Image: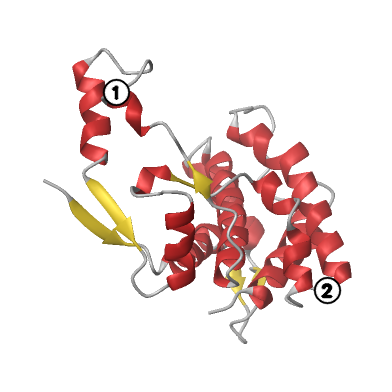
Amino acid sequence: MSFTQDFSNLPDALYDFAINQILWHNILEFKESGHEVQEASDAEEKRRLILDSDIYGLWAWWSRFSTGFETLIKAVFLSNKISLITKNDYLEKGTTGSNKLTTSEAAQVYEFIQGVRISALTKAWLQAEFTRWNINHPYEINTGTLRKYKDNLTKLEQLSKISSAEQIFLRDAITVLLDIRRNVDAHVFLKLQVGGSINGDLSRLYIPSINILLRAYQR
């Protein structure tokens, strides 16, 4: 049995997910205007409570924040009809070819996934991307790495969604995130667990970057 999922709302779904992750535990919050985020006045107390209740809690918070940051960038690109999507070509492993899995239990997972198809009924440009890449199933969607988005920030600048200065700022903020913050935490380096700022990077790099992206998002 097969069925089709409508992915027309992919940009909005990514945006909603990103905001949920970024605001987890309300360490960050929206300003009264609703268009920018800021650090909560009691952020330090909230971080302390997280750590008191879970020795790995700050690791979990930062991992979710970093995921939200990356997802927000992807949402901004897609909302402005800039697609960096490509195709994952691994679904055939389950049933055909030299990479066919020999364990039936594993192969059946791929077979099941192939029964779910996608479309973008109300987003013609997104459907065109799926068609261009011959993407037919959800797990074939490769949204790309954060580094790929960093390297394509000029596309947002060309659409006047961000300024030249904002493009440079975002590029450098992403570089710090990739080199220092996210990849260390994501690969379970638990000796530091810095839930706050490293020399003010949360308040001076990431929050301003999020606000730049919020302004660039096309609802």
| Location of residue 129 with respect to 184 vertically, above or below | below
| Location of residue 55 with respect to 31 vertically, above or below | above
Q: Quadrant of residue 23?
A: bottom right
SS under mark 2: loop
Q: Is residue 16 visible?
A: yes
Q: Position of residue 181 (x, y in %)?
A: 71, 41
Q: Which mark is residue 163?
A: 2
Q: Is residue 193 visible?
A: no
Q: Position of residue 27 (x, y in %)?
A: 59, 61
Residue extending furthest left? 1
- Front-most of 145 and 46? 145
Q: Please give the name of the residue rendered at 43% of the width and 56% of the height, measured from the top-left corner.
A: 130
Q: Position of residue 120 (x, y in %)?
A: 37, 66
First reached walking from the N terminus: tag 2 or tag 1: 1
SS under mark 1: loop
Q: Position of residue 16 (x, y in %)?
A: 46, 67
- Find the distance from the CA under tag 2 to the CA under tag 1: 48 Å
| Location of residue 66 with respect to 5 vertically, above or below | above
Q: Which mark is residue 96?
A: 1
Residue extending furthest bottom? 33
On screen, residue 63 versus residue 13, left or right, reads right
